[in-house]
Amino acid sequence: FPSHDTHEKGRTNSKARTCHTRRQGYLGSEMLSSIVSFSDPETNYFELSQEELLSDGVIRLGKTIIDDLLDRTLRKNLTIGQVTTVSEGIQTGANSVFVFDGQPDFYDELSKKEQALIKPFYKNSDIKKYFYTEKNSKTILYVRSDIALENEFPKIYAYLKSHKEILSKRAQIRRSKQAWYSLLWARDVQLFESEAIVTSYRPQSPAFAYKSGSFYSGTDTYYITKPKPGFQLKIVLACLNSKFASVWISIVTGK
């Protein structure tokens, strides 16, 4: 139902009056008249602007307390990327070479220095709300391009050399100056060894976990680090795991 117009900088924004009735079944003309005349006690009435009526291609006939809170949050326009740094996990380009179920078969043959390149590797399904499954089932051979592998890590070099044909054919390796034996995107090691919030790329339901030690994972995991002044990661964690954030995320993602 048309209501009234507001004018802002020469632009007309018509208001619409809408209603949502709780009555069911055959109502009859008298009851229908009561509803559309905005006098029925069993019907909720709203007044929405054009922007509110048609939001992201969806027609909304009313507003709830949640809608109001979400609108206020949106107007604040403060994203997680503005108060922290968000990064992806490791991209190997060849999981079959770098990722193992448990320790690799040749682990006991390696020197202590070489064994230090074998890191615990977590799946995104290991991440729960506030915590993660510490007993990981996988490991990753964490090799960066700046490592002098042949001289300092000869047995690992020999292992990777046996897969050189696969590793050399990775697209990023062919078009860059990276060493053929390195991970495609190893990221900064501090990302995996220091304080961070971790979450799955596409979780079934929002779940953010805090970690302070070693946590290596792939591109199906996001790391939230480096809070800006005035923010703390554990406070950010509590906000992200809150019921309000869960509602916000479900509406934004359509899940």
Image: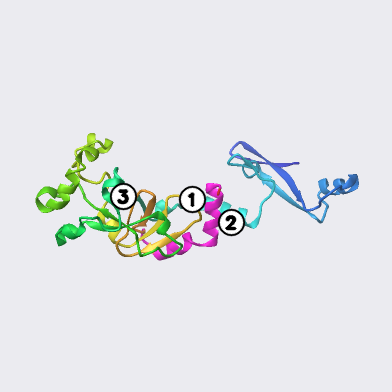
Where residue 132 sits, quadrant-wise, is bottom left
Q: Is residue 134 left or right of residue 178?
A: right
Number of residues whose C-alpha sits closer than 10 Å to that of mark 1, classed few (under 14), some (14–19) or many (20 or more):
few
Which quadrant would residue 10 be assigned to in this image? Answer: top right
Lower position in the chain sequence, tag 2 or tag 1: 2
Between the residue at mark 3 and the residue at mark 1, the CA separation in whole angstroms equals 30 Å
Closer to the chain start, of discs 3 and 1, is: 1
Q: What amino acid is labelled 3 in the image? A: Ile
| Pointer 2 local density, CA inside 10 Å: few below 14, some 14–19, many at least 20 | few
Disc assigned to residue 90: 3
Secondary structure that dominates the magenta span: helix
Report the disc number at residue 37: none
Residue 230 falls left or right of residue 181: right
Q: Secondary structure at mark 3?
A: loop
Q: Tell me whether circle 2 and circle 1 mark residues in contact (CB < 8 Å).
A: no
Q: Which residues are magenta?
A: 228-254
The picture places residue 221, in percent across and down from the top left corner, at 38, 52
Report if the CB atoms under discs 3 and 1 are less than 8 Å apart.
no
Using the image as rendered, state which of residue 61 and residue 116 is in the foreground: 116
Which amino acid, mark 2? Leu
- The question of residue 241 being in magenta is answered with yes
Question: Disc count in the image?
Answer: 3
**Residue type (three-letter) at the residue carrying disc 1:** Asn
Instruction: Report x, y in % for residue 52.
Output: 63, 45
Q: Which mark is residue 69?
A: 2
Q: Is residue 209 left or right of residue 33?
A: left
Dot 2 falls on a residue whose secondary structure is helix
Residue 83: x, y in percent? 40, 55
Between residue 87 and residue 35, name the one nearer to us.
87
Instruction: Provide the residue designation for mark 1.
Output: 77
User: Which quadrant of the rendered structure holds the N terminus?
Assistant: top right
